[in-house]
Image: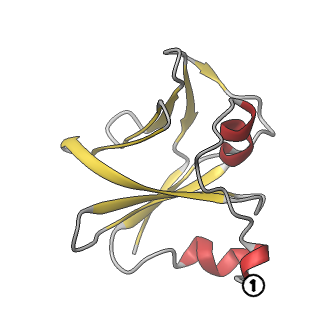
Amino acid sequence: MKNLIPNLSLAIFATLMGLTSIAIVPVAAQGIPVEITRRFPCNGGFAVETFRSVISICPGANGAMYVGEAKDGSGYINLSATSPEDQVYVSRNSGFTYTLNLKEQKLIITTPNGESFFEDILRVINS
């Protein structure tokens, strides 16, 4: 695995990799201040911060949600999340797999061709 280019946000990375079916919507276009969405993305759950992203795992009646936000405010993704093992959360969309592994303190992004990239978790934010 290799680190992504340091100034490349998760949302931009997904776009560059040809991921077109994912909803990447600028937070500012929705009239929502970026700082508020970073601090309060959902009720309950937790969030982690990487160099480029804030990822929240939000509980819900129909299962957990993975909310990934680019720290530069360029966009976000909302995906359903499963937890195949303790402290590991997995979301999939259009051949991409996003694995949030709290044990290894990494966000792992696997592309449709099997190439994996990672971002280190800088901190865990409990809600």
Q: Is residue 81 left or right of residue 68?
A: left
**Quadrant housing the C terminus:** bottom left
From the top left corner, tell me how far across and down residue 15 is, in percent: 72, 40
Q: Nearer the viewer, residue 5 or 109?
A: 109
Residue under label 1: 31
The answer to whether 127 appears left or right of 22 in the picture is left
Count of number-bearing discs = 1
Within-10-Å neighbours for mark 1: few <14, some 14–19, many 20+? few
Please, is residue 75 above or below residue 110 in the view? below
Residue under the point 26% across and 48% down: 82
* Whole-percent x, y for residue 112 in the image: 51, 22
The residue positioned 53% from the left and 15% from the top of the image is: 113
For residue 94, side relative to residue 60 (left or right): right
Extreme-left residue of the structure: 85
Which amino acid does the dot numbered 1 rest on?
Answer: Gly
Colouring used for the render = secondary structure
Residue drawn 70% across the image and 37% down it: 13
Task: Give 21 or 6, whichever is nearer the viewer.
Answer: 21
Instruction: Tell me the quadrant of the picture where the N terminus can be found.
Output: top right
